[in-house]
Amino acid sequence: MRNLRKLCLLLPLVSAMLIACTDNEQNEVVTQEIKKDLPIYGEKDFIEGIDKDTLYHTIESWSFVNQDSSWVKKSDYEGKPYVAYFFFSNCPKICPKINSNMKYFQEQTKGLDFNVIAHTVDPERDTVDRLKFYGDEYGFDYSNYNFVTGDKQTIYELGINSYLVPNQEDALAPGGFLHSEKLILIDSKGRIRGYYEGTEIKEVDHLIEDLKLLIKLEENE
């Protein structure tokens, strides 16, 4: 009898929890359905007659060497979305997590037309051979993925001035470098459309959804 009373008391609570879970799932679906556009980050200038009277911040020109000793330029990345981020191969904690998540990201986005570029912030140690070895360790498919190295100052300035994220040497930071953990979504016009925490798998899932949305938006332009 006592057990029966406990069961009776628990049933309303369980029912309430099930309803709450259902409501949360419905809210998530509604939120995804409502999201029909993505923001454009960075400073904006009003110039009459240009891109609906607004000139948006864009990524400046760049040219680096990838893991296969080939030059990769900004022009190679124009015309389709891409994802950019910063790392270094000797990074003890953050970068392994980011690149593990990016391997998951690549697996979940097979068949989508986009590119990825990963800039090292430690070009003195991250040689072409080192980048190739590093990428191979994670099993990346290089058909739309480049790990690049180049002039250190150029890489730092690109991060700060174009991608709007911090990049610098820092003796107090793990591994000796301070760099952003962000994954940065860029559209086909070189504009920043999103920032995502590269160490958080839920954020990577958000990036996947936003990438799909961006591709769809650009197909309809």
Image (tube, helix red, strand yellow):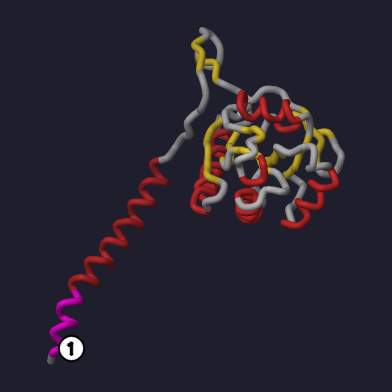
The location of residue 153, given as percent across then percent down, is 72, 26
What residue did someone put label 1 on?
Answer: 3
Write down the quadrant of residue 3 in the picture.
Answer: bottom left
Q: Is residue 146 above or below residue 92?
A: above
Q: Is residue 9 magenta?
A: yes
Region of the chain picked out in magenta, as a range? 2-11
The location of residue 171, given as percent across then percent down, is 64, 39
Tell whether 98 sits left or right of 143: left
Name the element at disc 1.
Answer: helix
Tell whether 104 sits left or right of 61: left
Quadrant in which the C terminus appears? top right
Q: Is residue 42 visible?
A: yes
| Magenta segment main secondary structure | helix
Front-most of residues 1 and 155? 155
Q: Residue furthest top?
A: 48
Q: Is residue 63 above or below residue 15?
A: above
Report the residue at 19% width, 82% height from top: 7
Q: Residue furthest bottom?
A: 1
Q: Is residue 109 above or below residue 72?
A: below
The location of residue 186, given as percent across then percent down, is 60, 33
Report the residue at 79% width, 46% height from top: 131
Residue type at mark 1 is Asn
